Image (cartoon, grey):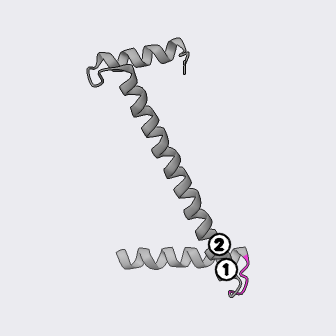
Amino acid sequence: MSIILTQEQEQFIQAKLQTGKYRTAQEILEFAFRLLDEYEQADSDWINSARQKIDAAVAASVHTPPVDGKTFVNQILEQFQQVRERQE
């Protein structure tokens, strides 16, 4: 496989090599690919977690009577006020 780098990418790699932290461009690219893989896995994990939470909330809402928006916000504000009072 042949990869063509932009001038900025080449300069980036050269700058990293000059720090002495990396010995070769290949080492830098391997590190970058590992980070990309970890990032994508974390992103996938977050999406799956969010979906599970949404599914649980939807399932719970089937057994919960609806609440209008104003009542919901007032309940949250009341909870914040109670927490603040306990902290004082």
For the point 65% across and 72% down, the residue is 55
Q: Is residue 23 left or right of residue 66?
A: left
Residue at image position (61%, 76%) is 56
Image location (x, y in percent) of residue 54 = 63, 69
Q: Main secondary structure of the magenta part?
A: loop
Q: Which residue is mark 2?
A: 55
Number of numbered discs on residues: 2
- Mark 1 in CB contact with mark 2 (< 8 angstroms): yes
- Give the CA separation, mark 1 to mark 2: 6 Å
Q: Amino acid at mark 2?
A: Asp
Residue 88 is at least partly visible in this image: no
Q: Residue furthest left?
A: 20
76 inside magenta stretch: no
Location of mark 1 (residue)? 59
Seen from the viewer's position, the closer of residues 27 and 47 is 27
- Secondary element under disc 1, as helix, strand or loop, is helix
Query: Which residue: 30% across, 15% down?
Result: 18
Picture quadrant where residue 30 is located? top left
Vertical relation: 62 (above or below) 1: below
Question: In the rendered view of the protein, which quadrant contains the N terminus?
Answer: top right
Instruction: Give the label on residue 83, or none.
Output: none
State the image coordinates of residue 57 (x, y, percent, origin top left). Answer: 63, 75
Q: Magenta segment: does it hold 66?
A: yes
Start-end of magenta stretch: 64-68
Disc 1 residue type (three-letter): Ala
Helix or strand or loop: what does disc 2 sit on? helix
The answer to whether residue 4 is above or below residue 75 is: above
On screen, 11 above or below 35?
above
Instruction: Please rate how many residues cluster around mark 1, counting C-alpha atoms within 10 Å: few if below 14, some from 14 to 19, many from 20.
Output: few
Image quadrant occupied by the C terminus: bottom left
| Residue 46, percent from left and from top | 54, 57
* Front position in the image: 28 or 57: 28
